[in-house]
Every structure is written in structure tokens, then in C-alpha cells.
Amino acid sequence: MSAPEEGGVNRSGGRRHTVPIDVHLLAVRDGAGGRPEVLLSRRAGDVYAAGLWHLPSGHVDGPFEALDTALIRETAEETGLVVAPADVRAAVTVHHRAPSGGARIGVLFEVRRWAGTPRIMEADVCDGMDWFAFDALPEPMVAYCRAGLDAYLAGAAMALHLQEPGDPIRHDPSVDRLRLVHASVARGGGPAPDAEVRAFAERAVGRITDWSDRSWARDASRVWRTVGRDGGVWFVKVHQNARFHARETAALRGWVPGLGGAAPRLVAADPALNAVVVTAVEGRPLHGAVLAAAEERSVFRAIGALAARIHASPPPAALPATLPVAQRADAFGKLERHLRAARPHLAPGDEEHARAVVEGARRLAPLPSVVTHGDLQPRNLLLAGDGTLRVLDFERSEPQPVVRDMARLLDHFEGRDDLADAFFAGYGRPLDDLERAHLAPAAVLDAVSGIAYGHAAGDPELVERGRRTLLRSRAGTLLPPRPSALAAPDATRTRTRS
């Protein structure tokens, strides 16, 4: 630690930069319908920014008053609320410069528990006090206060609000001087995107006031749900590598728009960052959803219909009629790579069985290649309020046989032939003999890959699905029975496997 400097002069001979410190109360409560609300007061009389809404706030009194003590004192003096020190939470710090050139540091504290009811305590400098939803803030508002609220909603640790001469004191969206300095952690506990990703996203959609980490808890692509200043919602994704980024952007620009409202729309892409911004789509995740049997059948019929739409999408001009022989032959090489990683986690006999099944696929005639999703499973499906499906995540989309999109659904058909019937009723046809012959090795290869990747990435669900698939393959119960006819989605019969 360096020695203190004397006389208010720094080592370069200039005067130190000294500014007053403000404390601001962010009293937050749940309003009607669960919408969070914040307490604001309107300034009045012979004060700065009279007539504008602002957070209850005040100055720190002298060098010996602690920040939280100042916050508690100012809260009582202005609102009548009594706040305990243990209920004060640091929210965001704002470095503000007014249009006149005067600067100050504002420290915003979040408080969610207090005693009393807020009321105007200083009628000579305040003529209004009320609760406002964060997505319906009042106007006119002090620009400095609005900057602090926007920074708080964005989850930033610090913000710079450096106004220029001639800027209005009141909030004006056309004169936006806010710059966010984010913490290393986003809301939700995951890592926040870096500054380049945040800047890219805001160039695409404007000021973002909230980042929530929605990534899977594993080492993979990162996803954030973002909320714009005016309430719009988008998702920002940073792919784990350039290959995944290229696949997803090609799908979003190519065949995904043909699905209409069943999929998000690409807003912007940056290959240098491996990042995309996409629109939000309605629906609750199917992953982990508890559905009645009839609703499950309806959902799987819809999944089949969605798969059929995907597979009927116009292929890229360079898409070959069948999967290249070299790529089919490489399936065995992929298996060997996956086996090396999965071997410590396989049951006795699994390795030999997987080799035999995948090796047998080499003798099969090739299947035509179509557009595929590449990861069609409940994790990437949403059920909308009207019962229709939405599909997400196209980073594994590539030309493959139709069975590629069915391999990860087989796990749901075990003991539920009614779901298999519903799926193929939605798909519009059963698999032919050649497709059924290709489906088994595709599922086995996917299972071994899932066990290897799941252990490396800490995804135990993926590991267990792979183990179940291998067990059923060895027992001869992997594929659903051949339907004699396409069943209605509410069929309830089950069949035993032959």
C-alpha cells in the first residue's frame, strides 16, 4: 500500500478527484400478479430536478457515517420506513456526472424487508410517493436515477452515467449515457457474457437491462435470456466451437424459417464470437414435464409431425442424395473414439455388442440424407399454451438419414408403444425395413457417445439414457413394434415385443 498523499495533490501534481457520495433506497416488493415494484418519490420545491421522479436518497453525512447507516437514516427521514442493517443489500454503484459537470458516486441498496408503511415525510421537498412496476416506470424521471435502475435490472455491479453539457436532467431515451460494468456472475449464478458479447447483443436489440444465465449445467454452449429496456425478450447464445456456430446459423438462415412460429428467428450472428441473438418463443419446457397419458400421446404425435416438417425442409443445394460412403464408414471410427472414453463406465459385454451392431451397419444399403435437427429430444422442445410445439437449439443440425432424429426418442417408447404409435401417426408413416435396420446402430452409437460425453461433461442424465439404450439393444427390445396401422393419438393399447 502506498503512503498517503498530502494536501489533496496526487503524485503527478494534479488535484485529487473528490466527489460527494449518495445513498439510494431500492425498496422492492411483489406487486399485483407477482410483478416486482420499486418505491419512487417525486421531488418538489426549491430542489434539483423538481417535478421528476427519483429513488428516495440522500448524502452520506461526513467521513465517519457508514454507507448502510446513511441509507437507513435517509430511508426513515424520507419515507418513514424502518430498516434493519441485516436487511440492507448492495445492489449497484453509479459514477454520475451531471450536465453541469458536477460528479458524484451513487450507491444503490436493495431492501426487501422493513417495518412501517411508506409515506411522505418531507412535504417541502417531496409531493408524491408510490410503487411502480419495473416495466412501467413513471415519467418524467431523473436520468441519473433511471440509469441506476437500468443498471440494477441488468445485474451490473457498476455503471457509468457521464452526461455531457446540454444533456437533459430528465430521462430521455434518445440521450442514453449509461455504460454498464458487469460483475463476473450473471443472475442465475452462471458466468456473465464478456463485454464483446454484451456489446454485440446490444448493437442488435438495443439496451439490455437483464441477463439471466439459462445454460445447461455442463461445459457446453452458453445461453442467456435477456430483457430489453422496453420489455422485449431475446436469447443470446455463444457456441462452444465454430462448427456448432456454423451449423446453427445455417439452419436458422436456411430451413428453420419454414417452421414459422414453431422456432425462434435469427436476429444477429457474429462468427468471430461464435454468438447469435434469437427471438424468444412461447412455451414451457417438455424436459421434466409431468403430463397425463392422453396429453403425452398428443405431444408425441405433435413431435412426429414436427419431425416430418423438418425432414421435408428444402435441403441445401449441395446436399447429396445419400450419405457418402466415407461418412458411413467413419461411423465405426467414431465408435472406437467414443468407446475409449466410455470403456470405464460400460457394463461387461457392452463394448463387444456395440461393435457388432455398428459393424453390421456397414453391410446395409445407404439411406437418403435429409435436413435433420440433430438433437430432437424433450430438452429442446417447448409446449405452447395452445398445445403446439416449439423447437430450439440447432447446433447439431446437418444432413443425415431420418433415423438420426429418432435415436434419442427411443428411450421414451420403452413400455409405451402408444407413444411410438402416436409419434409415427404424426410423422405420417412407419419406418421401412431399411430405416429400422439403420435405427438400431444409430441409437447404439449415440448411446456410447452419450456415456462418454456425459461423464466428461458431468451430465448424469445423458449417461443413464445411454446405459438404458445399450441394455435394451442387448435384450432385443430397442425398437418399437411395427404398427399394423397408424394409430390415433389417444390409443391406449400396448403390445409385447416379439
Image (cartoon, rainbow, N blue to C red):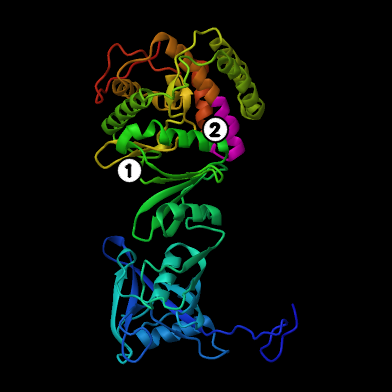
Q: Which residue is mark 1?
A: 283
Residue 366: x and y in percent read: 49, 11
In the rendered image of this protein, does residue 352 appear above or below residue 243?
Answer: above
Distance Cα–Cα, label 2 vs label 1: 27 Å
Q: Is residue 113 visible?
A: no
Quadrant occupied by the C terminus: top left
**Magenta stretch in the rendered image:** 447-460
Q: Circle 2 sits on which residue?
A: 463
Is 58 or 379 nearer to us in this picture? 58
Q: Is residue 187 magenta?
A: no
Element on which disc 2 rests: helix
Q: What residue appears at the point 61 percent right and 37 percent down from the top-left corner?
A: 456
Chief SS of the magenta region:
helix
Is residue 450 on the magenta stretch?
Answer: yes
Residue drawn at x 55%, y 57% as measured from the top left: 195
Q: Quadrant of residue 303?
A: top left
The residue located at (36%, 46%) in the rendering is 280
The outermost residue toward the front is 166
Foreground residue, 412 or 259? 259
Image side of residue 446 versus residue 262, left or right: right
Work out whether residue 139 or residue 89 is closer to the camera in this orientation and state it: 139
Q: Residues within 10 Å of mark 2 (few under 14, many from 20)?
A: many
Instruction: Name the spot of residue 244 as percent of width and height, x first.
Output: 53, 36
Identified by mark 2, the residue type is: Val
Mark 2 or mark 1: which is in front? 1
The amino acid marked with disc number 1 is Gly
Badge 1 density bin: few <14, some 14–19, many ≥20, Cα 10 Å: some
- Answer above or below: position of 487 versus 72: above
